[in-house]
Image: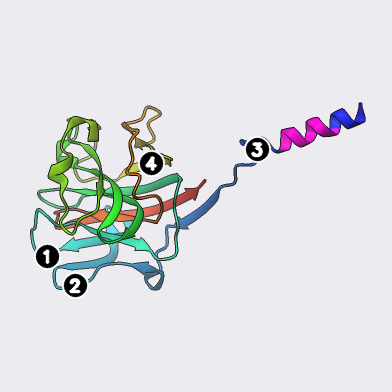
Amino acid sequence: MKTLFILLLILGTTSPYGQQKTVAHNYSVIKTSEWVIPRTDTLDYAFDKYLGQKALLMKRKIDNYKSASVAWPKDLNFIDGIIEADLAWPGKQNGFVGLAFRLKDAHHYEIVYFRPESSGTINAIQYMPEKKFDFNWWDYESDKYQSKATLPLHGWFHVKIIVKGSKLTVFVNHQTTPALIYNQLDNSLKSGSVGFWLGNSTVGAYRNLVITNF
């Protein structure tokens, strides 16, 4: 009887659910020495307050519909897990802000991005893999890559992304119902960092990035 009890105890503690280890990375405070943040003749950034909240502001100086930029922590390796952050679009037109994951470099990553100007439409959220020098969003315009969501035009909104294998689940503003589910993530992008993404917008605001690796 004692042997049976010990066996059951061992089986219980080696359950795949009981043994799943998670590691959290909190980037609420960004140390620039530990990040890649673009600053060039066409890109800039600042740490400032937006709507009363301290944030990273990524800025684009020249309009270019083929351009996209990412800022990411250098030493993070993400495969599967949970990504959470607060995003906002402070600009006047063409609002594109998002989160990149399984990021290898500035031109190879997967992304979920948000269009506050398209709130309530199928174009509010979009997933796509990026693997070219130009940001080729036009190759991923079909409805299967996009979804409706209610987004504030210029206010902060919370994003939670769950990545597991080939499946992506996106929640907005603490809703319990997913805003987007996508089941065919790019199998050539298996791991990498996680970062803030700015599309063809003059500015994007980002804060409270927390990643939990499975």
The Cα–Cα distance between marks 2 and 1, rounded to whole angstroms, is: 10 Å
The Cα–Cα distance between marks 1 and 3, rounded to whole angstroms, is: 50 Å
Callout 2 secondary element: loop
Q: Nearer the viewer, mark 1 or mark 3?
A: 3
Mark sitting earlier along the chain (1/3): 3
Location of residue 206 by image quarter: bottom left
Residue located 34% across and 59% down the image: 104
Residue 116: percent from left, percent from top: 19, 41
Q: Which residue is mark 4?
A: 161
Mark sitting earlier along the chain (4/3): 3
Q: What's the magenta region? A: 6-13
Q: Nearer the viewer, mark 2 or mark 1?
A: 2
Q: Which residue is mark 3?
A: 18
The answer to whether residue 52 is seen in the rendering is: no
Callout 1 secondary element: loop
Q: Which residue is mark 2?
A: 40
Callout 3 secondary element: loop
